[in-house]
Image (cartoon, rainbow, N blue to C red):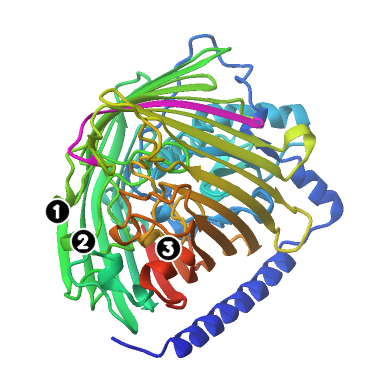
């Protein structure tokens, strides 16, 4: 359906400004309602304990078993055991400055960077407060470095509620200032009364629909319904820079790509299923599993196809076993899982989504399918060290199925203060994918990757400053290959300014193949992806130029007027590392310039509630000399708009 792009942009900007005004007014109102005297505010600051401050609780007997500290990947989304209407919400002062409330539907196995435990009504004794927080942490189990999992989060909250000193507890995920960072906040209200006996709750127990989607919850087990949905409206003008046939040539997904003018279409999906976890007898041993089905549809012509599509298929289907043990000085956990499930390393540079979207599956831009077709994942954690071993078989689209499989190991260390280190090894034993040079066709099978990582927060006492860097080196058992990728990002959060602005700069490099050397040097991005803040580098430009033979400069400004409202403005510049670009889009196989293009993206996110997230984004991509020379003209900017509603229960 064609529409006027000028009117689209005017409507989009007015809507975004209106949403910002409402959020600002709401934020001021919320601040007024929660204002408190200085003496109480000072006490509030003493209520919060981060995982960085925790040690084994003093009254823990040696060899005392606890729930495991190695959590499985995404199991499903279930609410706390008590009805949402009964929860007053997490106090604003419990949340780290500038944090943004996350909708669990938007999370896909991201790593938890920090856990904050907050006492709503602390005792007058500071030492006693710290002891109570340590006891709560031991029961809650969730730790930095774990993969975010709503089911395990809810069960941890239920264990905390069983403590004799706890009246109620609630937890929620937030996004920190570093892109892709997840912070879990656990807010606890203490009591001097003797706790009631543990009670079973859930829809199947009480018959109360207000407890949906919790079916059954006890101090030993949790079973819940998974229900996620998304509806997105997209509009694109001057798509493919007005040269669809040129830039989609050879792309099997582009069966009828969008032509000149403006195109608008809808994507929608619904995922529903069930997941649960239960303790085995009184042992620190748990079994868990889940299954879900996902229906996806695209209406009206999108960027690649002109027909309406709907697809139905299994998304999650997995089972696992978790064991944990704790002594006065150490904590040990083990988790083994298999089946269709999510897996990622770091922020998605190499592994983001394990499934393909688009073609007959529809929703190529909503990207709801993320689970690998088959996995075996083992995790072992000892104190601050985490070791993973994995086998991954991606759920690729049948039309482009390369039958690639991955095996490897991932080692991570988190001092739970300011330093995070990682080192991964990845091997590709089988694959039908090939690399191309002017003279040869080379197999991906036999690829090896070594992948070290570093993140530092608040170095040398500079609160708000953070830095992260990663490097990946690739070689192949079957031919001479020397490919590399590296990136570094420096950011600072102005914690005392209104809207808590964060400004960051990132430089990223992905090697290209120099035809004058004997080695093959083009970097293989594997399953790179994530979000526009991470490795979707340009909402428009990424569709014709992906993370190989590429140098990017990214500047990101993020504003958070309230914990529910987030605004970001991103500028990114793309350039080729080599003029030889064989393996990329056919029209850009041999570049006449290294300048690919520039893109500006404005994004807003607003949480209508815990269950509903409104997302709006607009991008303008400007073609560089390489694209202009490929079309023998300056085709003008490519405009793109998105408005989405995400639902999670």
State whether residue 476 appears in this view.
yes
Cα distance in 3D space between marks 2 and 3 = 17 Å
**Front of the two marks 3 and 1:** 3
Q: Is residue 580 above or below residue 299?
A: above
Q: Earlier in the sequence, mark 3 or mark 1?
A: 1
Q: Earlier in the sequence, mark 2 or mark 3?
A: 2
Judged left or right of residue 360, residue 643 is: right
For label 3, the crowd category at 10 Å Cα-Cα, with few meaning under 14, some 14 to 19 and many 20 or more, is many
When asked about the image quadrant of residue 528, the answer is top left
Q: Is residue 419 magenta?
A: yes
User: Pointer 2 and pointer 3: residues touching (CB < 8 Å)?
Assistant: no
> Which residue in the protein does label 1 denote?
399
Name the residue located 64 percent from the left edge and 26 percent from the top edge.
54
> SS class of the residue under badge 2?
loop
User: Pointer 2 and pointer 1: residues touching (CB < 8 Å)?
Assistant: yes
Spot the residue most to the front. Answer: 516
Which residues fall within the magenta stretch?
417-434
Q: How many marks?
A: 3
Judged left or right of residue 214, residue 196 is: right
> SS class of the residue under badge 1?
helix
For label 2, the crowd category at 10 Å Cα-Cα, with few meaning under 14, some 14 to 19 and many 20 or more, is some
Q: x and y percent of residue 551 in the render?
A: 51, 49
Cα distance in 3D space between marks 3 and 1 = 23 Å
* Nearest to the observer: residue 565 or residue 83: 565
Q: x and y percent of residue 476 in the render?
A: 31, 27
Q: Is residue 111 above or below residue 567?
A: above
> Which residue in the protein does label 3 denote?
541
> Which residue in the protein does label 2 denote?
253
């Amino acid at each position: 359906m064609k529409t006027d792009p000028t009117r689209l942009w005017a409507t989009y900007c007015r809507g975004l400004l209106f949403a910002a005004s409402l959020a600002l007014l709401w934020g001021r109102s919320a601040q007024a309602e929660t204002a408190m005297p200085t003496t109480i505010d000072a006490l509030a600051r003493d209520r919060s304990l981060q995982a960085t401050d925790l040690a084994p609780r003093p009254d823990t007997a040696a060899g005392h078993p606890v729930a495991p500290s190695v959590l499985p990947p995404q199991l499903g989304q279930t609410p706390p055991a008590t009805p949402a209407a009964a929860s007053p919400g997490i106090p604003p002062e419990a949340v780290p400055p500038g944090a943004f409330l996350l909708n669990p539907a938007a999370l896909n196995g991201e790593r938890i960077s920090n856990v904050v435990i907050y006492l709503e009504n602390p005792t007058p004794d500071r030492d006693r407060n710290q002891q109570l927080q340590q006891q709560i942490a031991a029961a809650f189990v969730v730790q930095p470095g774990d993969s975010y999992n709503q089911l395990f989060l809810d069960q941890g909250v239920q264990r905390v509620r069983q403590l004799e000193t706890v009246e109620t507890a609630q937890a929620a995920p937030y996004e920190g200032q570093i892109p892709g960072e997840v912070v879990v906040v656990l807010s606890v209200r203490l009591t001097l009364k003797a706790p009631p006996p543990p009670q079973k709750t859930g829809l199947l127990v009480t018959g109360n629909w207000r407890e949906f989607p919790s079916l059954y919850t006890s101090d030993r087990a949790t079973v819940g319904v998974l229900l996620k949905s998304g509806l997105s409206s997209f509009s694109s003008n001057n798509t493919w820079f007005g040269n669809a046939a040129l830039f989609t040539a050879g792309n099997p997904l582009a069966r009828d790509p969008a032509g000149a003018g403006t195109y608008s279409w809808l994507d929608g999906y619904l995922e529903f299923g069930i997941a649960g976890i239960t303790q085995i007898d009184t042992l620190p041993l748990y079994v868990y599993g889940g299954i879900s089905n996902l229906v996806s549809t695209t209406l009206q012509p999108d960027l690649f196809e002109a027909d309406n599509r709907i697809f139905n298929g299994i998304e999650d289907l997995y089972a696992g076993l978790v064991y944990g043990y704790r002594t006065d000085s150490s904590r040990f956990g083990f988790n083994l899982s298999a089946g269709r499930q999510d897996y990622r390393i770091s922020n998605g540079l190499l592994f983001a989504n394990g499934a393909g979207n688009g073609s007959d599956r529809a929703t190529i831009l909503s990207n709801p399918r993320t689970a690998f077709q088959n996995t075996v994942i083992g995790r072992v954690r000892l104190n601050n060290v985490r070791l993973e071993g994995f086998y991954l078989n991606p759920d690729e689209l049948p039309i482009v199925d390369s039958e690639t499989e991955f095996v490897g190991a991932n080692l991570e260390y988190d001092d739970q203060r300011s330093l995070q280190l990682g080192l991964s090894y990845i091997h590709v034993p089988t694959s039908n994918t090939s690399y191309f040079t002017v003279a040869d066709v080379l197999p991906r099978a036999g690829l090896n990757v070594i992948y070290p990582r570093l993140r530092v927060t608040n170095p040398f006492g500079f609160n708000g400053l953070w830095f992260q860097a990663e490097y990946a080196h690739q070689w192949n058992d079957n031919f001479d290959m020397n490919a590399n990728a590296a990136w570094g990002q420096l950011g600072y959060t102005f914690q005392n300014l209104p809207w808590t602005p964060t400004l960051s700069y990132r430089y990223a490099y992905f090697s290209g193949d120099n035809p004058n050397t004997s080695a093959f040097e083009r970097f293989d991005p594997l399953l790179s992806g994530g979000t526009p803040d991470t490795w979707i580098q340009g909402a428009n430009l990424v569709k014709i130029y992906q993370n190989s033979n590429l140098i990017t400069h990214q500047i990101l400004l993020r504003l958070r007027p309230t914990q529910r409202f987030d605004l970001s403005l991103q500028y990114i510049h793309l350039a080729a590392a080599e003029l030889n670009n064989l393996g990329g889009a056919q029209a850009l196989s041999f570049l006449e310039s290294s300048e690919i293009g520039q893109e500006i993206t404005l994004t807003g996110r607003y949480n209508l509630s815990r269950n509903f997230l409104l997302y709006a984004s607009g991008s303008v991509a400007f073609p560089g000399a390489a694209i202009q020379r490929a079309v023998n003209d300056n085709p003008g900017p490519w405009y793109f708009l998105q408005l989405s509603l995400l639902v999670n229960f």
